[in-house]
Image (tube, helix red, strand yellow):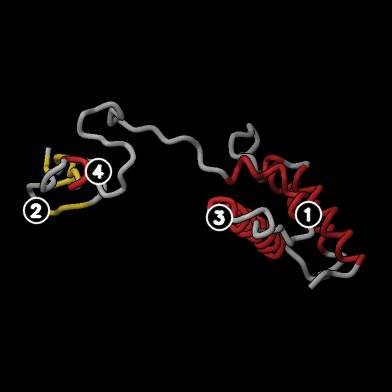
Amino acid sequence: MTPSDTTKKILEDFIEIYKSNPCLWQIKNKDYHNRDKKEAAYKLLIEKIKKIEPDANKDVVVKKKNNLRSNVRKEKKKYEQSLKSEASADDVYHIKLWYYDLFNFIHDQCTPGESSSNLDSDDENSCGACPSCIFLSINYKTKAINRRSDLVGANHPTVVFVRCLECTGSGGSVT
């Protein structure tokens, strides 16, 4: 459902005000943790949204902002999944949100940063491409076995790499 022209214009202005106040959305901004700047920015957003919702307050604005951002993320995810599925050009998902492009300033905020690993990718235990090979963490104190190796603290686990049949050429192996 497309909003009326008046509502659409107010929401466009709302998004523009949001964009012009990176203290609300840019985590690495120096003012992101500045309560006074954030409150001033929220007051601007409240005044704008009151034109379509007269009883609007900060909670309404936060919900509206989160709803808009969530819809943008969902559309982006649908589009990216259609690209990954190697669909033909005709089958690639077309963004349907009218305000998707207005949120282009947050797309780099939605993308997770590069992760790092303390596991050497050139290690002989890592095939690198096989999803069947897994790392297990074994905690000998609690006898717990997990597929993740991020346990920390006094019960520090031992990490083992389990290679699949294809990678070992035999019956699998544990190293």
Q: Which residue is mark 4?
A: 149
Mark on residue 143?
2
- Residue at (16%, 40%) from the top-left corner? 168
Q: Is residue 80 among the parts visible in the rendering?
A: yes
Amino acid at dot 1:
Leu
- Spatial distance from mark 1 to mark 4, Cα to Cα? 44 Å
Other-residue count near label 2 (Cα within 10 Å), few / some / many at <14 / 14–19 / ≥20: few
For label 3, the SS is helix
In this view, the mark in front (3 or 1): 3
Other-residue count near label 1 (Cα within 10 Å), few / some / many at <14 / 14–19 / ≥20: many
Q: Sequence order check: which comes first, mark 1 or mark 4?
A: 1
- Residue at (10%, 48%) from the top-left corner? 171
For label 1, the SS is helix
- Spatial distance from mark 4 to mark 3, Cα to Cα? 28 Å
Amino acid at dot 3:
Gln
Q: Sequence order check: which comes first, mark 2 or mark 1?
A: 1
Q: Which residue is mark 1?
A: 45
Q: Which residue is mark 3?
A: 81
Q: Sequence order check: which comes first, mark 4 or mark 3?
A: 3
Viewer-proximal residue among 47 and 136: 136
Q: Give the side of residue 9 with respect to residue 68, left or right.
A: right
- Residue at (14%, 40%) from the top-left corner? 158
Q: Sequence order check: which comes first, mark 2 or mark 3?
A: 3
Q: Are marks 4 and 3 in contact (CB under 8 Å)?
A: no
Q: Are marks 1 and 4 in contact (CB under 8 Å)?
A: no
Q: Are marks 2 and 4 in contact (CB under 8 Å)?
A: no
